């Protein structure tokens, strides 16, 4: 109960006036009869006097001006619509749309539309053979072209960044 931290926190509340009337009576009784409480109270009063008598230091106006001048030398980041290349976004979108369209065309080509009972357009997905798709030459050509186009897109993007870097210096 009478640990150093507990004594200090109760005394700080007493000094700051945050104690209730009952706590004030108890603390005054401890201060009257306990040497440890009296010693800690005197230390805390000295700290309180030092805190109230000292003024907070403020930086000089020249320091503030120097800091603001340094900050103004840096380039401010432009708004997002200025540095996002819309052509890249369109190219990525076109790539994925082409990819999805290719998969759908191949899937519909695998369906046997002449089966009896297909009049209500219920698809039998068991007839779609994906092993043919992933092993076919056409799929490999499509994937190779997609990879080459993706690499060309990355190359043009990085070349643009490199030109911006050298022209901005």
Image (tube, rainbow, N blue to C red):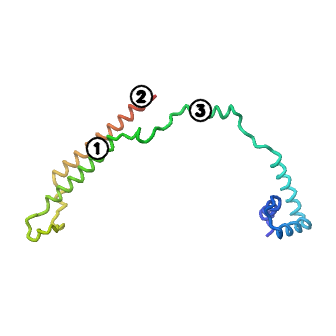
Q: In front here: 30 or 89?
A: 89
Residue at 80%, 65% in the rendered image: 19
Q: Residue 135 carries which label?
A: none
Disc 2 target residue? 167
Vertical placement of residue 24 versus 105, above or below: below
Could you say whether the residue bearing mark 2 is in a helix, strand or loop?
Answer: helix
The numbered disc on residue 150 is: 1
Residue at the right extreme of this rendering: 32
The local secondary structure at tag 3 comes to helix
Of the residues tagged 2 and 1, which is closer to the observer? 2
- Residue for badge 3: 70
Q: What is the spatial separation of the Cα atoms under label 3 and label 1, in whole angstroms?
A: 41 Å
Residue at 29% over, 44% down: 150
Left or right placement of residue 135 versus residue 43 in this view: left
Q: In which quarter of the image is residue 3?
A: bottom right
Relative vertical location of residue 19 with respect to residue 139 in this rendering, above or below: below
User: Of marks 2 and 1, which one's residue comes earlier in the chain?
Assistant: 1
Mark pair 2, 1: CA separation: 26 Å
Q: In this view, does 84 lie to the left or right of 24?
A: left
Q: Earlier in the sequence, mark 3 or mark 1?
A: 3
Give the CA separation, mark 3 to mark 2: 23 Å
Q: Which residue is drawn at 83% across and 46% down?
A: 53
Give the foreground label among 3 and 1. 3
- The percent coordinates of residue 47 (x first, y second) are 82, 52
Q: Which of 80 and 2 is in front in this view?
A: 80
């Amino acid at each position: 109960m009478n640990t150093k931290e507990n004594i200090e926190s109760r005394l700080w509340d007493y000094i700051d006036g945050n104690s209730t009337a009952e706590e004030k009576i108890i603390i005054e009784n401890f201060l009257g009869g306990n040497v440890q409480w009296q010693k800690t109270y005197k230390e805390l009063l000295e700290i309180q006097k030092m805190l109230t008598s000292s003024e907070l230091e403020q930086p000089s106006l020249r320091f503030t001006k120097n800091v603001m001048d340094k900050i103004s030398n840096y380039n401010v980041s432009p708004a997002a619509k200025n540095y996002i290349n819309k052509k890249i976004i369109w190219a990525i979108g076109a790539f994925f749309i082409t990819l999805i369209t290719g998969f759908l065309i191949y899937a519909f080509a695998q369906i046997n539309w002449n089966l009896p009972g297909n009049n209500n357009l219920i698809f039998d997905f068991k007839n779609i053979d994906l092993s043919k798709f992933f092993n076919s030459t056409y799929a490999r050509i499509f994937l190779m072209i997609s990879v080459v186009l993706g690499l060309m897109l990355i190359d043009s993007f990085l070349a643009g960044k490199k030109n911006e870097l050298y022209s901005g210096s």
